[in-house]
Image (cartoon, rainbow, N blue to C red):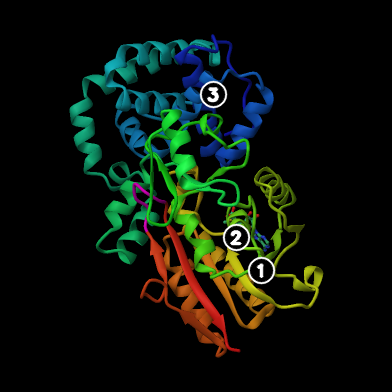
């Protein structure tokens, strides 16, 4: 299968056929190993003038299809003797997804998928696409029943992922998987240096945007909206940040004057929150220069200041001036298994042995950062993963290797594992204190 994105089809840009086929090409790219972020970047670069409505339709279909992915392949395997060439196989996936969420428009979906198929490979598979989708509709009840009895088709995650969750969360694995297949919530963080809760709630009421405050101060929108509709966003009064991510700054127990390191800072959500809460001197590192630039952009929008540097935090000889930090945030690279509904391509691109690779990288980061933490200082370890290897097991291993490390309880527990739900994503936090 080619890893190149094929040229975009000649279909009216505002048609469902165009959105279906463009989405199919993105899905085909992901099945060939590209991340959705990469595939989208190529698409928008080649089509910078795509109208907002068309973009929205393409994104909706693509994210929805990747969340459902697994179920469509199960159904297609029942209806096709062998897979069609791409992007037609993915066109069928996207069309099946759309049939599932918009059964009321079934005939339009089939018609538009056939229109799209007519523009690919000289229309050779137009009839097959038509036949498969019509059969899917005719046999829908039987196919759905069979899909519900198949592990991957039912839970829409890869088998190794399902097995891992089932063994690590015997009670809640089903709800974790179900949450991973939902639309993510949209939460906001107030920039308390620039605005207050009452003024914000008034502005949201005036803009007809229902919102509620969660226990940790995050604001949860009833429905996600583009940031351009958020009152005060452009002025830096608010940021988009998941409610689960909004625990980090509080857990760090910040005080004015501290030296703080955010070792894996990009795109800067937690760094900004730290600076909104206290007058600290913050060094924000990220190993990826493009992502590090986003930290600067975000801080500028919010009127905040930090030293932002591109560096591998493990290589302290290259970036550390020798003065220890009072607080360190280690928001490490991870499997992102707790935020899979925001990046549904991840669950299909990851492999089981990636988890051990992430854990090894995280262990190296922890070791390096411990050396630059002041005696009596605290390090908050954070992941957006739900896998124990990256979380509880990682911290148990680290604490076992360091006699000068004490794990401070969070909310009466040794650590804090947030599971994805309607209010927040999946996050893990552990707070480590270095002996004075
Ligand atoms: C989970 S994200 C951080 C999110 C960020 N803390 C926030 O709240 O916006 C992890 C980041 O770590 C960076 N990273 C990965 N390995 C790194 C390393 N060895 N040193 C520094 N940054 C690293 C990645 O580029 C990525 O931006």
Residue for badge 1: 260
Specify the quarter for ligand 1.
bottom right
User: Quadrant of residue 258 in the image?
Assistant: bottom right
User: Quadrant of residue 135 in the image?
Assistant: top left
Residue 420 is a magenta residue: yes
> Of 67 and 159, which appears nearest the observer?
67
Q: Secondary structure at mark 1?
A: strand
Q: Magenta: predominant secondary structure element?
A: loop
Residue for badge 3: 55
Residue for badge 2: 274
Is 361 situated left or right of 115 in this image?
right
Residue at point 36%, 52% (across, down): 159
Q: Secondary structure at mark 3?
A: helix
The answer to which of marks 3 and 1 sits earlier in the sequence is 3
Answer whether labels 2 and 3 touch (C-beta < 8 Å).
no
- Is residue 366 among what the camera can see? yes
- Indicate the position of residue 166 as horizontal and vertical percent values: 30, 60
Q: Which residues are magenta?
A: 419-424
- Is residue 86 among what the camera can see? no
In the image, residue 129 sits, relative to residue 355, either above or below, namely above
Answer whether labels 1 and 2 touch (C-beta < 8 Å).
yes
- Mark 1 vs mark 2, CA separation in Å: 9 Å
The answer to which of marks 2 and 3 sits earlier in the sequence is 3
Which dot marks residue 337?
none
Between circles 3 and 1, the one closer to the viewer is 1
Between circles 2 and 3, the one closer to the viewer is 2
- Mark 3 vs mark 1, CA separation in Å: 40 Å
- Check disc 1: other Cα within 10 Å, few if <14, some if 14-19, many if 20+: many
- Indicate the position of residue 106 as horizontal and vertical percent values: 30, 16
In the image, residue 130 sits, relative to residue 394, either above or below, namely above
Is 190 situated left or right of 267 in this image?
left
Cβ of disc 1 within 8 Å of ligand 1?
no
């Amino acid at each position: 299968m080619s890893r190149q994105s094929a040229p975009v089809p000649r279909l009216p840009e505002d048609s469902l056929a165009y959105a279906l086929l463009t989405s199919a090409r993105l899905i085909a790219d992901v099945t060939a190993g590209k991340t959705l972020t990469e595939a989208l970047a190529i698409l928008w670069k080649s089509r910078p003038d795509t109208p907002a409505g068309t973009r929205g339709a393409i994104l909706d279909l693509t994210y929805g299809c990747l969340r459902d992915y697994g179920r469509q392949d199960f159904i297609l395997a029942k209806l096709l003797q062998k897979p069609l060439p791409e992007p037609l196989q993915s066109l069928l996936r996207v069309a099946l997804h759309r049939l599932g969420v918009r059964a009321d428009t079934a005939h339009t979906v089939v018609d538009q998928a056939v229109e799209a198929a007519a523009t690919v490979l000289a229309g050779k598979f137009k009839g097959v696409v038509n036949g498969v989708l019509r059969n899917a509709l005719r046999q829908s009840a039987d196919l759905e029943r069979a899909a519900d009895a198949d592990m991957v088709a039912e839970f829409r995650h890869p088998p190794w992922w399902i097995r891992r969750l089932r063994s690590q969360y015997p009670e809640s694995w089903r709800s974790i998987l179900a949450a991973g297949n939902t639309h993510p919530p949209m939460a906001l963080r107030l920039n308390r240096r620039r605005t207050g809760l009452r003024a914000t709630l008034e502005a949201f009421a005036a803009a007809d945007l229902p919102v509620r405050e969660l226990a940790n101060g995050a604001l949860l929108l009833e429905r996600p909206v583009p940031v351009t509709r958020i009152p005060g966003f452009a002025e830096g009064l608010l940021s988009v940040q998941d409610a689960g991510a909004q625990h980090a700054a509080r857990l760090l127990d910040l005080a004015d004057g501290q030296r703080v390191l955010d070792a894996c800072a990009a795109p800067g959500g937690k760094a900004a929150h730290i600076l909104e809460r206290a007058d600290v001197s913050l060094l924000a590192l990220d190993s990826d220069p493009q992502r590090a630039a986003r930290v600067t952009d975000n801080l500028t929008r919010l009127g905040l200041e930090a030293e932002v540097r591109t560096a591998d935090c493990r290589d302290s000889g290259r970036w550390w001036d020798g003065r220890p930090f009072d607080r360190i945030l280690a928001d490490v690279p991870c499997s992102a298994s707790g935020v899979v509904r925001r990046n549904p391509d991840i669950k299909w691109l990851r492999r089981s042995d990636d988890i051990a690779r992430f854990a090894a990288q995280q262990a190296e980061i922890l070791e390096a950062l411990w050396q630059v933490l002041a005696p009596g200082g605290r390090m908050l370890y954070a992941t957006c993963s739900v896998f124990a290897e990256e979380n509880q097991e990682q911290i148990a291993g680290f604490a076992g290797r360091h006699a000068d490390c004490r794990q401070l309880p969070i909310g009466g527990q040794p650590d804090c594992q947030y599971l994805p739900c309607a209010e927040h994503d999946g996050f893990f936090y552990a707070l480590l204190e270095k002996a004075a």
